[in-house]
């Protein structure tokens, strides 16, 4: 919002108006597609649920984490969602932020991730996420 006050967009009739509008619309549509794709991909993974992604560039999916994984996390001196986020990073390169830092509801586990990367990268990342989650679930069954 402050940026708009500093540098207002071109007005209709200005030389750059058409190119500005086209670029703005393209960015908006890409963000919309990516948010919908990430939302659908996360909700397709058993044990993962996510609210629609509206108004931010982040997803905050709820992750079901087994008692065995919770115990492994406690033994390492960390919260279960931190264990999940660290193992996700180690196995896939996907960087997330554990939800425990955001005041999540007691007894629930989340991670926060963004949907800003290019669409082709997000498709691969969501596939990697799904494969990781299946492996994590089996490892701590």
Image (cartoon, helix red, strand yellow):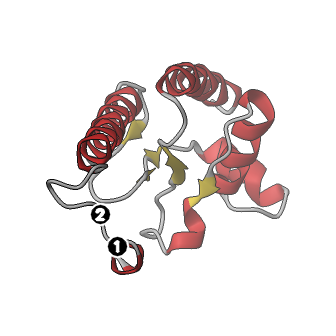
Task: Locate residue 119 relative to residue 30 in the image: left or right.
Answer: right
Residue 134: assigned label: none
Task: Locate residue 53 relative to residue 7 in the image: left or right.
Answer: left
Determine which residue is flagged by label 1. Answer: 4
Location of the C terminus (image quadrant) = top right
Q: Residue 35 location, x and y as percent?
A: 34, 39
Q: Residue at x 57, y 42 (%)?
A: 66
Q: Nearer the viewer, residue 54 or 42?
A: 54
User: Furthest-right residue in view?
Assistant: 76
Kindly check if marks 1 and 2 are in contact, taking CB atoms under 8 A apart as contact.
yes
Given this view, does label 1 or label 2 mark the residue nearer the observer?
2
Q: CA distance from mark 1 to mark 2?
A: 7 Å
Q: Residue at x 41, y 33 (%)?
A: 42
Label 2 element class:
loop
Bin the neighbour count of mark 1 within 10 Å (Cα to Cα): few under 14, some 14-19, many 20 and up: few
When the figure is inspected, residue 81 is found, relative to residue 129, above or below; the finding is: below
Q: Residue at x 35, y 34 (%)?
A: 30
Q: First in sequence: mark 1 or mark 2? A: 1
Determine which residue is flagged by label 2. Answer: 9
Label 1 element class:
helix
Location of the N terminus (image quadrant) = bottom left
Residue 81: name its quadrant: bottom right
Q: Residue 117 location, x and y as percent?
A: 55, 36
Q: Nearer the viewer, residue 108 or 19?
A: 19
């Amino acid at each position: 919002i402050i940026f708009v006050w500093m540098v207002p967009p071109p007005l209709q009739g200005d030389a750059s108006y058409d190119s500005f509008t086209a670029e703005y619309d393209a960015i908006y549509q890409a963000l919309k597609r990516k948010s919908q794709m990430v939302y659908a991909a996360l909700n397709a993974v058993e044990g993962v649920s996510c609210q629609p992604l509206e108004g931010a560039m982040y997803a905050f999916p709820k992750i079901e984490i087994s008692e065995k994984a919770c115990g492994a996390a406690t033994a390492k001196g960390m919260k279960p969602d931190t264990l999940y986020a660290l193992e996700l990073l180690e196995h896939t390169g996907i960087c997330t932020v554990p939800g425990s830092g955001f005041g999540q509801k007691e007894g629930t586990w989340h991670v926060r991730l963004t949907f800003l990367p290019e669409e082709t990268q997000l498709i691969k990342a969501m596939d990697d996420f799904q494969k990781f989650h299946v492996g994590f679930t089996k490892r701590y069954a």
